[in-house]
Amino acid sequence: MRRAVIGPPLFLFRFDVPRLGIYNLLIELHLRKQVSAREYESGRSGREVARLPFSDIPHQSPLFLQYQADRPSLSQYYPNSVGKISDLKGYADQVRSRVQTDRQVLCDALERINTEIDAGDITLRNIARLRESETVAVVTGQQAGLFSGPLYTVYKALTAVRIAERLTSMGTQAVPVFWAATEDHDFHEVAEAFSIGASGSIVRGEFVGSGRVREASVGSIQLDDTIVKTVETFCDSLPQTEFTAEIRLLLKQAWNPAGNFGRAFLNTLSSVLASYGIIYIDPMGQMLKSLASPIYATAIEVSDKITADVMATSDRLRKDGFSPQVNVAEDYFSLFWTDKGSRRLALRRSAGGEYRVKGGNRKFGRAELLQIARDEPEQLSPGVMLRPVVQDFLLPTVAYVGGGAEIAYFAQNSGVYGILDRPVTPIIHRQSFTIVESKHKRSFDKYGMEFRDLFDGRDANVRRVGANANPETERLFADVQARVDAEMDSLADAVTMIDPTLAANLTTRTRKIRHHVSAIREKTLAAHARSDATFIRRLDGLFAELLPRGELQERSINVFTYLNKFGPNFLDAVYDSIDADQKGHVLLEI
């Protein structure tokens, strides 16, 4: 599957607005040239990349690290895991043979969704391919986030495209699908977006949604007039470049008071990624809910088995030294109730066998829930343990592309697939990037630093650079420390001969002396480094842009930071650097 771009460039793909002169023509010609020359094996960006093992990155879960390093050892949790992308070819036959959803009805629904968000001709052609019985889907997804959310949302989508393209090139017809988790109700997790402002500092944009209903599904939240100011403030904070006007126009049209949060999210992704042919799914649609009705009903019928299995799997994970991603109690139920106000409310099983809405008085018997699943499936919404199975019931999913947390979810719910008579979908970790600009590379080179040094913290790097820049002072302190040690050793011998009981006291005081010398050494070297205003400015820039808010760049910064700097070339650079078979974190130099 090769990308074929015919028509406007990325930013103006969706909207019927005037083009911006020769600049857009150049981008269009550039994209056509890039696409016409690209094949999977030879189409690398040519940019420098460095790979960092996730074990070198703090705060990674042991389960995720073991999954990346030794998947066969976790086969009880991931029975269909694959070692490399080419192994998915063998799983594709099993997927095709287990399709239960009517492909034509499904694709009719997908056509409607993707036409409404103006996803473009390439996407519609991929939907037509999905109608064919031989076609499988490479699926990914993410919560609907403000202005598309963090960078890893785009990295997920592009990873799915790359895997689908590779499978197709090997003879397994595949299309990329993005499942927008519009039913989730954790609004505060998705209501903010971070960019790198003109000053190099982190800028936070937020949609408050003052009139929103608490616990409403994110996708249903109506945008209001405050979103206009949010868009303007976000765009004003960006360095003003030749791309800023188009970005402002795109965001103003996608995020406007006439729309809702879920649709704005999908409009944004479909605009930015228009040339990649991604099929988008909004699971809140009536047609998709009707298609999901059978799996909802089956899940209700076997709900006790699902709860017992997830609890037992969680216990096994703990015994194996891993922490379950979700804590499940005996009253757990895998479906949520959606009321008439679009509130998504948890259901809990009572001792008497009824199902109560958490925090409310509404209750249901099992027979009543089954009737709702059959007649009004839009009133139900799958929880995190059931959603992957629903997703893979609707779609011929050959692989799911997810992050570390999703990999942990799959460990807990692999048994749910078996209970619902579905094959367990292989999960592939999305590509993980840190964008290293030339200015960052120059700073690393000048001060003898590398990316992993940032994990030690700002103060440690100030001291380290101070020591490197002040070798004479460093040698002086080392000499003083050596002489102090020698003198204290001599004193210890003399004291021990006079009164051995004083030896322990002297040892304690010696440690304190060494500590004080070391402390003044660090303060002196740090003071020297701090006196270099250029170094401090560059160091703060490294932390702000490469490790913002103390976490990987991809977990905070929004894609428009880099589209504003580099234009569509940024997406090409990321896309061409994806190799889903490699399992480390990528430092991509741009």
Image (tube, grey):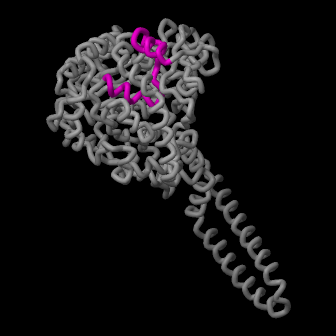
Residue 260 in sight: yes
Q: Give me the residue at 20% from left, 24% from top.
A: 4
194 or 75: nearer the eye? 75
Q: Looking at the picture, how far across and down is residue 104, in whole percent?
A: 23, 14
Based on the displayed image, in which of its 4 quarters is residue 135 positioned?
top left
Vertical arrangement, residue 493 with respect to residue 535, above or below: below
Name the side, left or right, on which 280 lies relative to 359: left
| Front residue of this view, candidates 44 and 216 | 216
Give residue 409's position: percent from left, percent from top: 45, 37
Which of the two residues, 288 or 192, is positioned nearer the viewer here? Answer: 288
Residue furthest front as drawn: 352
Horizontal side of residue 89 vs 552, given as left or right: left
Pick out the residue farthest to the left. Answer: 171
Residue 428 image offset from top left, x and y in percent: 34, 40
Magenta segment's dominant SS is helix
Q: Is residue 205 left or right of residue 385?
A: right
The magenta segment: 366-394
Picture quarter with the C terminus: top left
Q: Quadrant of the N terminus?
A: top left
x, y percentage for residue 121?
Answer: 24, 16
Q: Is residue 48 magenta?
A: no
Asked if residue 435 can be seen in this view, the reply is no
User: Which residue lies at the image location 42% right of the left edge and 15% below the top edge?
Assistant: 373
* Vertical placement of residue 38 versus 82, above or below: above
Image quadrant where residue 13 sits: top left
In front here: 2 or 303? 303
Q: Give me the residue at 74% from left, 73% from top.
A: 511
Number of numbered labels in the structure image: 0
Q: Check the image and name the residue furthest to the bottom.
A: 497
